[in-house]
Amino acid sequence: MKSNFIDNPVFRFASAVGDVFLLNLYTLLCCLPVVTAGAAFRAMLSITCKMAAHQDYSLTRDYFRALRAEFGRVTALWLGMLVFGGMILFDLVFAGKLGGGFGAFLAAAAGGFGLVLLVCFGWSMALLARFTYTRKRDCVSDALKLAAANPLPSLLMAMLSLAAPACLLWQVELFSYLLPLFLLFGVGIYGVAVGWLTRPAFRRLEGDGRGPEEQKTSEGELEE
């Protein structure tokens, strides 16, 4: 009787909603210092990648274990991306004030780099959640290769990242209605989506012999 209750679709759905809520809560709280945001997203993706792979996990224990693991390396990568993102944001603001044809060109170029950065962030954090890297640049290189080799998942990843800002710019009133839902589930839904979007690529890597948490060195780069 207990087994039938656990296997009930309603119970599974409620359990999944609860997991997404907790992931969202843990990640938002751990992002508050800003400097820890990279480690928080990496910890979230360590859980969602296990969800996508149908592996067992203990959400709270595994999340905070992943948050502490490789904290320095993950944070250094995140801070580098944060600085790069700040430069892109400055270029967008400057292009808006500049106006004219050159301003439009600069805005388009900055927007393109911004999209690449968003996609690279998603793939990089997912890679760090699934594998161990000895050098940050190897992770970024692999992230860009996977993004180029998987354009549809990368596009969907970028769209998810921009959903809230786009809604805010498009219609402030609608954003105000959706804000509570985003605060409760938005980041967790992004994490679950990234876990499923990256799963086919990771399945191929693991099929080639690179298992989860396997050591990644500069000699073990992805094949073209």
Image (tube, helix red, strand yellow):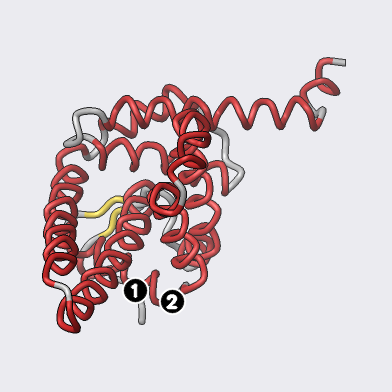
Left or right of 55 in this view: 42: left
Residue tagged by mark 1? 145
Q: Secondary structure at mark 1?
A: helix
Up the image or down, 201 lies above or below 130; here it is below
Tell me the quarter of the picture where residue 37 sits: top left
Q: Is residue 47 visible?
A: no
Whole-percent x and y of residue 127?
36, 55
Is 12 situated above or below 213? above
Residue at image position (39%, 76%) is 148
Spot occupied by residue 146 in the image (x, y as percentages of width and height): 39, 70
Q: Is residue 96 visible?
A: yes
Neighbourhood count class around disc 1 (C-alpha, 10 Å): few under 14, some 14–19, many 20 upward: some
Going 44% across and 66% down the picture, which residue do you hit? 154
Disc 2 residue crowd, few under 14, some 14–19, many 20+, Cα 10 Å: few
Residue 125 in picture, x, y percent from top left: 33, 50
Q: Nearer the viewer, residue 216 or 174?
A: 174
Taking depth in this image into account, of 26 and 128 the one nearest to the observer is 26
Residue 149 numbered mark, or none: 2
Instruction: Name the amino acid, label 1.
Output: Lys
In percent of width and height, residue 29 lies at 32, 25
Q: Is residue 89 above or below residue 32?
A: below
Quadrant placement of the C terminus: bottom left
* Cα–Cα span, label 2 and label 1: 6 Å
Q: Amino acid type of disc 2?
A: Ala
Tags 2 and 1 touching, CB below 8 Å = yes
Where is residue 139, by image quadrant?
A: bottom left
Q: Quadrant of the N terminus?
A: top right
| Position of residue 71 in the picture relative to residue 190 (left or right) | left
Under circle 2, the secondary element is: helix
